[in-house]
Amino acid sequence: MLLILDILTTAGILFVVSIGLLAVFGVLKIINFAHGAWLTIGAYCAVVAAKLGLNPWAALPLAFVIGGALGGLAEHFIIRPLYRRPLDAILATWGLGIVIGQLITLGFGRDVQMTPNLFSGTVEVFGADYSAYRLVALGAAVVIGVAFALTIEGTRLGLSARAVIMNETLARGLGIDTARVRLFTFMIGAGLAALAGVLLTPLTSVDPNMGVSWLIGAFMLVMVADASFLALGVACLVFGAAQVLISTFVSPILGSIAIAVLAALVLRISPKGFSRA
Amino acid sequence: MPDDVSALGRAARPERGRARLSRTAPFVAAGLAAVALWIAPLVLDTFAVNVLTRSMIYAVLAVTVDLLWGFAGILTFGQAAFFGVGAYATAMALTYLGATPAWIAVALALAVAAPMALGLAVGWLSFYHRSTALYASVISLVTPIVVTQLIYSGGEWTGSSSGLVGFDVLPLELEGFFRLAAFVLIAVTLAAWVFVRSDAGRALIAVRDNDARCAYLGLSPKRLQIALTAVLAGVAGLAGFVFANASSVVAPENAGFLFGTELVIWVALGGRGTLLGPVLGTIAIDYLAANLSGDLPFLWQLLLGTAFVAVIILLPGGLAELARRAWGALPVGRRSGFAPRLVVSPPRPEADASDGPLLKIDGLAKSYGSLTVLENIDLDIRAGELVSLVGPNGAGKTTLMRCLSDGTEPFEGAVSIAGVSTAGLTPNRIVTLGVGRKFQVASVFESLTVADCLLLARAPHDGLSALGRAETLTLPQAALDVLRMTGLDRMLAEPTRLLSHGQKQALELAMVVALEPRVILLDEPTAGLTKAERTTIGAVLKTLTADLGIAAVLVEHDLDFVRQISSRIVVLHQGRLVLDGTVDEVVNSELVRTIYSGGAHV
């Protein structure tokens, strides 16, 4: 029973971490390798919020706004010149990630930072104690997922974004300002990444390179989901389950590479990943 | 020569710049470098010798990344994994077997063979019919992660996170390892230099530019990519062998994804698509890093990261591009590019004039979901026939061409070439059955010259030299005719991206004809051409079919043109074959008039 909870919460955390990358990949068709750096930015927003003596939860909107604003700058100066060179965009965003990591190191030092717990303690589930925060994280994943779905389905930006995903040339021909759609999408993606960074603080240590370890998993999940929002949810559940089961019953080391290896195999067999199903 | 070439066009240029150097130039340069590096340890201090030994080993890896990424267009983070496997194979062999000369030889063999085997597996996983460049990069990312985790889980056997230390190594001093690293670097760079300048080196660039065209020339781009991955994995393993010996330490980071990205950064800064750029860039950056990162570790990383982002955006050719621009500004005469002499190949012995049709289509049907694009197509085409396929837009003509030339396309029914079924065959294997296809949009290699494009078209017949450039280019008479009539024979050294639309169409036709196919598929070969160019191409097609006995299938909208050259006309309408007859029968039929004037629903 606890295993199922572990799987669900792991999937929830993976979903929160990958959703921003998915939004960017879907609309801009590029992989944002600075995604990990934005997770780190979000986590340091929590650190700053704590230093300012704010309520720990206040870090969430703070991170979303700061992450989004920085994302806007990055889109304008780095991503935009590379629209036609998607492989180069991977490299440039990776370089950007290095720069951000070093700037954070210069500002905060390379040591692990302490953050106040967003939510502490355990709750009793089915007769066993379970980390309350993991359940909160799962709830946050659902909230973010629903909000994201509403944005896509119910707003003008969502409609434009869907048009750009399907056929960018046609969308531009119909008078949609695709450059603006790209900019806003990147800002939202970056904001969501920073938000995820705050949500990660109780689960991992906060240091300047914390984002990199999450990046590869998120990247593989997005590749398998192929820009489909529902497929991402499915991928997080399936691969999250694989990770938990392999870590529990085989070895934690194999569990840590389960997502990358399984995703690569799925892509080899079905290049569109889970989005076809 | 304009300097604002696209990123794709870049790799052809260093070759061109060096073409003026004589054939022996690389060897002279290598000799000089060898002498200089032999003397260097005598004048450098110990720290510099130590650091530069490592830098030169990294430079070997940079050459392999550059060949894959800069030349063949495969962005890879995986070379670190192969390097790590080579280094660990060496360290483990030396630790557990000992460092006698025999075991050192075994260690060397393992350090090359193990990464090559892994490289084959990675290549097989990365490159398959319809695989994408992004997927190959994904796999190259996964490989070092998996290798690192395997090292961690190896326990005492691999030393886990602390690695292996203190094993016995080659009996060399500091200077000896410096010279060994220098020797390996010079040898690998020289081999790479000779290779990329050779005819076979053109194939790398061709695969990067347009791997579909490669496949439709009968070359196997995937096999080339797999072979390249495996061989360069072996070279990376060799570098790992030298590294393990020179440092006497191996750690999981040596195989890691972060190291893989560093290699890409060095190559990008030095200048992808050139060889000296990445070599000098890697040595300079690693040497600077060793000197600076002690004092300002974070600032150094920050500067490097910033420089990397700036170079990717503003200067995709790296520092080598700057050097080349400076060199280009000097008043040194540039000789035009290399062009071989054209030679006529002896006419092929007349194909066995068997009675059966060359191309046979049986009940072919194709649908996308509920949308039926083609149904119930039966067609036999014999040697010497020129069959025109006409029909309004959306009738399924191009889809039919695709089904004929790619057996992996999902469709019902059967297609056979001279009695051999094409079911499940990839395009390059169908080409070897004797089918040549010309695309609707001219498909040539934009970074290569006219002569190089033709050379690749002849590769299945004449092979490609991996050592040098052939002095002559043998082409069948019909291909020469196409070149002569369109004036391309005087533009052999011209890069194809500078050709006009009509010239590109003619070049692609010449390439397809140079394959000496038995069946030739032409999708609107005259679209967008002038009247004179059309007449030329029409004349060539008539010669090919009437005199050489080639069967041709031509998709065409221009009914006048079709009437002049066809021996038979087939009308396709809404996915069905509605008429099949002689020119007169079809042109005078009521049906064709209604279809072309619109509104007919058969």
Image (tube, rainbow, N blue to C red):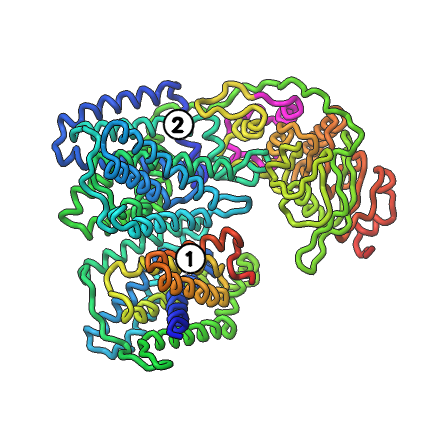
Q: Residues within 10 Å of mark 1 (few under 14, many from 20)?
A: many
Q: Residue at x 18, y 26 (%)?
A: B40
- Lateral position of residue B76 relative to residue A48, left or right: right
- Lateral position of residue B36 relative to residue B205, left or right: left
Q: Secondary structure at mark 1?
A: helix
Whether A29 is drawn above or below A194: the answer is above
Is residue B482 one of those drawn in magenta? yes
In this figure, which residue is indicated by the disc labeled 2?
B17
Q: Quadrant of the C terminus of chain B?
A: bottom right
Please state which amino acid type lies under the numbered disc 1. Met
Residue furthest out toward the front? B97
Number of the front mark, 2 or 1: 1
Segment tinted magenta in the rendering: B474-502
The image position of residue A199, as x and y in percent, is 32, 71
Is residue B115 one of those drawn in magenta? no
Please state which amino acid type lies under the numbered disc 2. Gly
- Lateral position of residue B248 relative to residue B6, left or right: left
Counting every numbered tag in the picture gives: 2
Whether B482 is drawn above or below B289: the answer is above
Q: Residue at x 33, y 20 (%)?
A: B27
Name the chain letter of the residue that bears numbered label 2: B
Whether A113 is drawn above or below B428: the answer is below
Q: Residues within 10 Å of mark 2 (few under 14, many from 20)?
A: some
The image position of residue B330, as x and y in percent, is 33, 28
Q: Secondary structure at mark 2?
A: helix
In this figure, which residue is indicated by the disc labeled 1?
A220
Q: Quadrant of the N terminus of chain B?
A: top left
